């Protein structure tokens, strides 16, 4: 069973059913002896949570959204994610950069080239020993999750779930056509990097989703044993 740092992100349109399974997987990793950091984006630090509130509740254009989201991500990476991975922890993150390409890119129609440049600046990793200032100008690699779990559900089903669950934020209140574009953006990201993504049919029962999720973790050597049953 792998004991080095492990970074897993969870993606999907609002109402796809991520939260229940993130919590259950976090509990399972802890039961099997892993030290775990459970976090989210935008958010994960006091500064990033403040920026999250602006993004979710204040009107703004797509460029402003993208800049705020990447600013929050930079603080999150520097303060939480990278130190946890260096310690050998498991990091479970509710959304990461794929969400920005899906929501601000595909959903809002923002320029993907600019998003890619911001991604390189924020997630660029220089050679060991290189100065911090070298990241933006000469990144040699990008920090990406070791695995991204994409929960896929029809936008109409997701909207129905949200209507029953809570009051909608600025994004959740957008029309289904927006979420259809977001879902396609996610599908395109997954098709471009099939080795990083596992695509889960979120329109199955909780037990079926849970079995697929835990089987994936077990097959990759990240869980010592599989657990029967489904999350509550």
Image: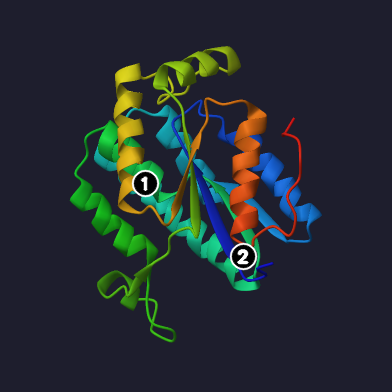
Q: With 88 as the anchor, is 33 left or right in this view?
A: right
Q: Which quadrant is home to the N terminus?
A: bottom right
Residue 33 picture location, percent across and down: 79, 61
Q: Residue at x 32, y 78 (%)?
A: 134
Position above or below: 17 against 213: above
The mark found on residue 70 in the picture is none
x, y percent for residue 45: 56, 51
Callout 2 crowding tier (Cα within 10 Å): few <14, some 14–19, many ≥20: many
| Residue 201 shown left or right of residue 189 in the figure | right
Residue drawn 60% across the image and 44% down it: 213
Percent position (x, y) of residue 224?
A: 73, 60
Upstream in the sequence, badge 2 or badge 1?
A: 2
Using the numbered discs, state the Cα–Cα distance from disc 2 to disc 1 in whole angstroms: 26 Å
Work out whether residue 54 or residue 145 is closer to the camera in this orientation and state it: 145
Please tell me whether mark 1 sits on a helix, a strand or a loop.
helix
**Residue at figure coordinates x 59%, y 60% from the top left:** 220
Element under disc 2: helix
Residue 198 position, x and y percent, is 48, 47
Q: Is residue 28 visible?
A: yes
Q: Around disc 1, counting alpha carbons within 10 Å, would you say few (fewer than 14), some (14 to 19), or many (20 or more)?
A: some
Which mark, residue 84?
Answer: 2
User: In this orientation, does residue 175 appear?
Assistant: no
Residue 74, quarter of the rendered image: bottom left
Q: Residue at x 42, y 64 (%)?
A: 143
Rendered image: mark on residue 190: 1
Q: Residues at badges 2 and 1 in contact (C-beta under 8 Å)? A: no
């Amino acid at each position: 069973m792998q004991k080095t740092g492990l970074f897993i992100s969870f993606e999907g349109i609002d109402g796809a059913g991520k939260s229940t399974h993130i919590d259950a997987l976090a509990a399972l990793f802890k039961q099997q002896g892993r030290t775990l950091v459970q976090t989210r984006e935008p958010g994960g630090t006091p500064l990033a949570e403040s920026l999250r509130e602006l993004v979710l509740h204040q009107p703004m254009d797509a460029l402003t959204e993208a800049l705020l989201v990447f600013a929050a991500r930079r603080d999150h990476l520097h303060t939480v994610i990278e130190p946890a991975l260096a310690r050998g922890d498991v990091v479970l993150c509710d959304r990461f950069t794929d969400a920005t390409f899906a929501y601000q890119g595909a959903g809002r129609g923002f320029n993907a080239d600019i998003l890619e440049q911001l991604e390189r600046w924020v997630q660029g990793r220089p050679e060991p020993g290189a100065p911090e200032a070298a990241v933006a100008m000469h990144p040699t690699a990008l920090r990406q999750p070791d695995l991204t779990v994409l929960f896929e559900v029809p936008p109409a089903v997701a909207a129905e779930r949200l209507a029953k669950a809570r009051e909608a934020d600025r994004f959740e209140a957008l029309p289904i056509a927006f979420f259809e574009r977001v879902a396609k953006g996610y599908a395109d990201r997954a098709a471009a990097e099939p080795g990083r993504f596992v695509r889960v049919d979120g329109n199955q029962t909780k037990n079926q989703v849970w079995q697929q999720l835990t089987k994936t973790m077990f097959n990759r050597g990240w869980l010592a044993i599989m657990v029967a049953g489904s999350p509550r």
